[in-house]
Amino acid sequence: MLEEGLNILYKTDLDNLIQSDLFAKLKDVPVSKIRALSQMNNPRLIADKPMLLVNFKAGEVIAYLGAYHDYTIQGDKKIAIGWTNDLWVHPAKRGQGLAGKLVVELYKQFDGNLVVADYVPNTFHIYNSKGKFTKLKPIVGKRIFLKKPDAVWMEKRFGLSLKKNILKTYLKFLPDKPTEIAETLLSYKQNYTSKLETEHENFMDDHKRNSIFNYGISEWNHWLAAPWLSEIEAEPRFHFSTHSKPFKQFCLELRDDTNAIKALLFIMVRGEELKVKQIYSAPLNYDEVIKIIINNAQNFACTQILLYDTNAIRSLKKYSDHYIFEADSKKHLLCGDAILDKLLNTRIDASDGDLAFT
């Protein structure tokens, strides 16, 4: 199942591993079942590209590196892209270069078409040190607070710093509650849909942006129907987050009085956060889009909204009475040199790299 040394696992190999007796006995596992099942059902999975690299020695997993599959279309050619995730080395084996060897091997397996997001910032330097990646400019979104930021968020964002103390003082002068947006203030009708049809596909085609990953309705329908296969308990032997708690995600239609679609919003709600994954809309409708987003956050009792769409962010200021505070939300990407030019000249949306899992 796992052999001594480096193991390169494709879909069938990964399926066999999580069903095996060995998986049940391992002290540390290279993936949780919930994550493996979700990634194996990824509609953009590439059959001839690996999903997981595992270094196995003396009956133990000593290092691993995952790859979430995606692709871009160049002409009539499909170019496989790997989003690296879950880089881990056993504490007793660190400092031996194992992580770097996994990164280089995965880079080779994907012909240099790798993208790394700084979800785990302290491993970012490992990728950067290989000399095979070029850092892209930060992708800047907005985090909107419908109540004052709590101490946990402030500690994570600022730690012990002067900025934190200044912000705490500033927040004292802000209102405790923003003005709500009532349904009567909305110009368009809202409708939640669980399945996209030809009408939606045509609308999306008319409102595509210059994105390296243009998801179609089959992929969005997958996201709506089976995005993250639920399990009762998290996997304690896996060293990364596995979200087994329920969350909601849906496509929200905005329609006018003639029942014509004016916008499509792909939204995820988990806990107190509403995340706007992607928006399809004409620019002139974005003021209404923002009102709808805030209204939905209110209805779901969310305290935060996260969005990256530049048109939506431009419209935010007009509705500042309806939220307490806003802060930049930055993510950084490293990409393999093979796709650098493509990535630099296209848009990266919040949904890219996590369509089929979170």
Image: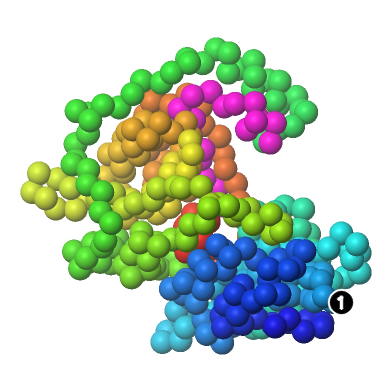
Residue found at x 47% / y 15%:
175
On screen, residue 17 above or below 32: below
Q: Residue 33 is drawn in which quadrant?
A: bottom right
Looking at the image, can residue 247 be seen? yes
**What amino acid is found at the position of numbered circle 1 in the picture?**
Ala
Mark 1 = which residue? Answer: 58
Q: Nearer the viewer, residue 214 or 57?
A: 57
Please report the residue visible at 83 percent of the width from the left and 63 percent of the height from the top: 90
Q: Is residue 146 magenta?
A: yes
Residue at image x 18%, y 41%?
Answer: 189
Image spot of residue 145 (x, y percent): 49, 30
| 241, 276: nearer the viewer | 241
Q: Quadrant of residue 227?
A: bottom left
Of the pair 13 and 313, the residue shown nearer to us? 13
Specify whether residue 188 is painted magenta.
no
The reply, left or right, for residue 5 in relation to residue 44 is right
Left or right placement of residue 347 versus residue 312 in this view: right
Asked which secondary structure carries label 1, the reply is: loop
Rendered view: 319 above or below 229: above
Residue 95, given in percent of the width and then of the height, sits at 91, 64
The total of numbered circles placed on residues is 1
- Which of the 4 image quadrants contains residue 314? top left
Image coordinates of residue 57 in percent, x first then y, are 85, 77
Residue 41 is situated, as x and y percent measured from the top left of the image, at 46, 72
Q: Quadrant of the N terminus?
A: bottom right
Residue 30 appears in the rendering: no
Q: Which residues are magenta?
A: 139-156
113 vs 357, left or right, is: right
Question: Which residue occupies 45% across, 27% down?
Answer: 146
- Horizontal placement of 153 versus 237: left or right? left
Q: Is residue 187 above or below residue 168?
A: below
